[in-house]
Amino acid sequence: MTDLPAATPPTPADDPTGSPYGRHVGLRPALDAAGTPATPTVTEYPVSFTGRADEYFRIWIVNVALTIVTLGVYLPWARVRTRQYFYGHVWVDGQNFEYRANPVALLRGYVLVGTLFLGYTLSTQFQKYWIAVPLLLAYVLLYPWLVRQSLRFQAANTVHRGLRFRFSGTVKAAYVAYGAANILASIGGIFALPWAWFMQRRYQLDHVEYGTARGHFRGDVAPFYVIAVTAVGIGIGLAIAVALPVTAVLFGTSALDSGSLDDLKTTGLLAGIIAAYVAFILLYTVLWQYVRAATMAYVLNHAELGGVVRTRATFRPWRLVWIGVTNALATVVTLGLATPWAAIRRTKYVMEGVQVRAIAPLDDFAAGSAERPSALGEAATELLDIQVGF
Amino acid sequence: MTGDAVPGVYFDGRRSRDYPATLTLGEQGVTLSVPDLGLTRVWSAADVSVDPAIPGVRRVVKFSDGGRYETAQDAALSAWERHTGRNRALSGVRWLESRWTAALGALVLAVLAVAAFIAFGLPALAQQAAAVTPRSVLAAFDRETLKVLSSGDYVGPTRLSAERQAQLHREFRDVAVWAGGGYPYTLLLRNGEPGGEGSGIGANAFALPGGTVVMTDQLVALARSDRELMGVLAHETGHVTHRHGLAGVYQGLGLTLVSTVLTGDLVSASTFAAAVPAALLRGGYSRAAETQADEVAGHYMLQRYASTRPLQDILARLESQDGDESPSVFDLLRSHPGTPQRIEHLKAMQRAALP
């Protein structure tokens, strides 16, 4: 849940209306006396993350205990507090981010979505398909709308320097990026999936607003194909590397086909099954982490806001894969107790590998219109495991 | 408490610019002072909201005009918060979060709660849910399961003679009447090896939630007396009256929910990793169900034949037919308690009943 504050592209922008305090740099580079565009000075602001594993561990375990004691009612407060911790510890140019969702709104969404989900699970279990099929259909039909709601909710509840982010993507565009693109991806598989990723990232970034400044994704579709092909190649390579020793073990044990060695055979078989199982989980984790990390780096390197702010990623995707895999191992080995440490470790590495480059002071943005979208989409994305963000 | 000017920064909510500011906290309200803007404003307590504290993050005070003041001086603001009675509940949460002893307590509580829920709560809940599930659902369950069974190569039509079938049905009626509960008990005799030796489900008997009991020809052949068979059938009615089948479905559902809550998602590496422990737990639940059904069968045997011996015998024969596997890691994964324990349990029942 808390991999990183996904909805905080730390990408503010500029204000075309001019500043009353004399510190404003316009949308276009100002003209100097000779009438030629002045070369804008680029200021690079590092992003820092000040969260600490020991501090977050206590927040996390108290969240878990309170959620259990209150039979889940505390869950929205726990989620909001976790996000507030992560957002609040991300600093750009001396100011931190803020997450400000209302837990009560989230709770309403959780109850509604949770009830529908439980209804669906129970009705499939008892083969009451006249309930299950319409519910599933409604979910599929509403999915792009839910994603849009979620993006709106996340953006509107992210604050930096007293200004909110906003997400202005239309419902129609959501149905293209998350409806049509996903349908094509499910038909076309690997040939269409990277295109769907591209459409979705573009939809997310092109409609982010910070105050009156608008986000823009300068990226192209081709690099998404490169990422996908790389992942497939690595997947095949690793699968072969893993399958060979496992098959050897299985063959070795079946060669010992004398009745007295039955126990040994059983043990060998069991070891083979466990090895294959662990290898599968590792392979899945590596590939998934790679796709995520490489996509995130590419997106951050091609995002801009209001024409004056760009982001740059200097974290290394493979290092992030290593962090992801070791995090997963640590979490499993400690029976989940390392979860907070893992979340802090990953967020710190990602955030401190991001730079914000601006040709205008970051304190010259102006507020846009304010609105409060409902928490339904947000609750749905958390409960139904929709992947949004990076 | 009052009078101290707390340093911080001010945002007017319309621009991203920060201004140095001070906030003076008073009983009735606060005074905001922003020298750069030449602004000094008194806000009444009702027009000010204070966000609950997050460890290590600047405190935020919001004003009703959209402006905000942020400060790293937590102590002063927390004192004012306490004094004016704001954010009581979340201040309590913060108090817990700042102590390692509280964290340790929370950890122990969480572990105990999860363990207790899996050991007692979930079976009890599942049993409750199974008990209130309508009969029509049970009947639908039976129908669907039988469809699956007959479509696959698990069972085929019985090869027993018509007289033998009628006899078994007659004897089963006695067990069914004894078991009670108002279930429409039906005995289905089937060939457990439709594709020849070693295929299908072999010598077996099982009950579906709605009261349908299936017994294979191979089990009938294995028995040396009908008492043995009636013992097995009584065991199966025990599964029906205690609604074990349905409770098992609910328990599976509950375990999925628990692992989703613990791992935080539905499909991921951690969910795969949780699959094995979940299977072990499910096996544990069904071992408890087997013991309970044996208990029912034992009572029937003692009442009818004054001995649990026939059931012990057929269990032992089933075991030796399955091959004498030495105890191995697979025992953990087996859903039934080991046969020796089951036989021992039946012997104990007999000793207790006949001093």
Image (cartoon, coloured by chain):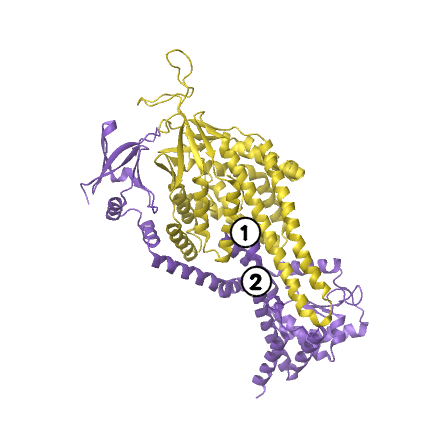
Residue A340: percent from left, percent from top: 43, 51
Which residue corresponds to mark 1? Answer: A118
Which dot marks residue B130? 2
Do marks 1 and 2 both belong to one polypeptide chain? no
- What is the three-letter code of the residue carrying label 1? Leu
Residue A11 occupies quadrant: top left
Q: Which residue is located at x 75 percent, y 57 percent?
A: B151
Reply above or below: B353 against A197.
below
Chain B painted colour = purple
Q: Are marks 1 and 2 in contact (CB under 8 Å)?
A: no
Residue A350: percent from left, percent from top: 46, 41
The number of numbered discs placed on residues in the rendered structure image is 2
Query: Disc 1 on helix, strand or loop?
Result: helix
Residue A370 occupies quadrant: top left
Chain A painted colour = yellow
Q: Is residue B133 visible?
A: no
Residue B256: percent from left, percent from top: 55, 56
Q: Please tell me how crowded label 1 is: few (under 14), some (14-19), or many (20+) other residues with Cα within 10 Å.
A: few
